Amino acid sequence: MSKTLIRGAKVLGGEPQDVLIDGETITQVGAGLSAEGAEVVEADGKVLLPGLVDLHTHLREPGREDSETVLTGTRAAASGGYTNVFAMANTFPVADTAGVVEQVWRLGQESGYCDVQPIGAVTVGLEGQKLAELGAMHESAAAVTVFSDDGKCVHDAVIMRRALEYVKAFDGVVAQHAQEPRLTEGAQMNEGVVSAELGLGGWPAVAEESIIARDVLLADHVGSRVHICHLSTAGSVEIVRWAKSRGIRVTAEVTPHHLLLTDELVRSYNPVYKVNPPLRTERDVLALREALADGTIDIVATDHAPHPHEDKDCEWAAAAMGMVGLETALSVVQETMVDTGLLDWAGVAERMSFTPARIGRAEGHGRPVSAGEPANLTLVDTAYRGPVDPAGFASRSRNTPYEGRELPGRVTHTWLRGKATLVDGKLT
């Protein structure tokens, strides 16, 4: 592979430096590096970050290739600055065996745009009745370390306890979709003033908070790791903060859309705003931002949930839940966290690369931008601002809540082990 010199990049938002890539590795970082024999990328003060890592992506393959495939999903990931994504298990068939997770892993290898680490199901068929083949999935070529029934909650406390006990043997983690099913039957949106005025079934915050409270106590009892998916309420923040103060091994994620959007948008009845967990109140949004800034919430995860046009372009009650997010995540984080002064770019790298890689044991990802490290990198034009146009998405689906909305920042280049997967905003 040829050499590449990234000239004048603000590494993690610091002073401009040059970064030399030779083959798959960063070989030098400093000022005034020689460009001899290298292709030069003029960074012009753009921010250089380690390749982003998403701990929560739905790639839909196998079974729902009308929504997304591993290839289109990883192309979307590269467009958004990601070099590693964790693919959720709610496929058809469910990723609850070594065979299915290996299939997803191999498809990721073949795509060449982004590394794919499959997440294994906690229970067979996501049915919550019987533990899946956790050990076999971990020992497979995919080396699964994260397990989740995301899309459904592991609502049975005994099953959850057994899963935590099982993964402890290899320091795995159970990622919980915190939703008490009995409290959300028929729910269409956040329970509150807006749901009452619209006459839509309400989704109470306690449905999330009660499961989180139970599971951090179970994790404490077992001495295992639990990760909370798409945390969305101020009350959930307080429970996680309390658990961390007790030394419980809990981590948590927030999605970009829960950092920016509120349930007031549901007044439009536009199904693009229908998501699980639902958009919450302005109070919740502000609490989530503060918690991400102070480290109570560990990471940003997209919960990229593609759906075909017909599953979203319908009446609210019939519409599927979910939003695409890989290609807009960094822009939303800049809008809500960086441009508001809550985080600097080093903080963004911590929450969107270093920490998710550490939680998921993503080898070679979430590494410092320094000599000797793998060249998994993303270059961001932070001065850019413009409207979101889903027609230009690499994802197979277009269900974004940001269409036409102006957002800051644009990923211009992505490198996966030294290979440019995105150049000047275009996939290679």
Image (cartoon, rainbow, N blue to C red):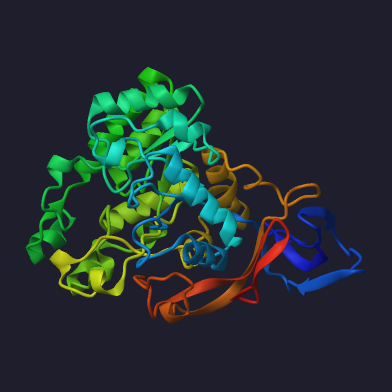
Query: Which quarter of the rendered picture does the N terminus lie within?
Result: bottom right
Task: Please provide percent x and percent y for residue 303.
Answer: 39, 55
Describe residue 8's horizontal placement relative to residue 94 as left or right.
right
Task: Please provide percent x and percent y for residue 396.
Answer: 41, 71
Q: In terms of depth relative to the viewer, which is nearer, 98 or 246? A: 98
Can the viewer see residue 103? Answer: yes
Residue 237 lies, with reference to residue 262, above or below; the image says: above
Residue 89 lies, with reference to residue 385, above or below; the image says: above
Residue occupying the point 46% across, 35% down: 137
Query: Which quarter of the rendered picture does the C terminus lie within?
Result: bottom right
Task: Please provide percent x and percent y for residue 362.
Answer: 58, 43
Residue found at the very far front of the displayed protein: 99
Residue occupying the point 68% across, 69% down: 46
Describe residue 389's horizontal placement relative to residue 376 as left or right.
left
Q: In terms of depth relative to the viewer, which is nearer, 207 or 71? A: 71
Residue occupying the point 78% across, 53% down: 25
Residue 295 lies, with reference to residue 392, above or below; the image says: above
Describe residue 13's horizontal placement relative to residue 213 as left or right.
right
Residue occupying the point 45% across, 52% down: 301
Please tell me in which quadrant of the rendered image residue 31 appears.
Answer: bottom right
Residue found at the very far left of the displayed protein: 199
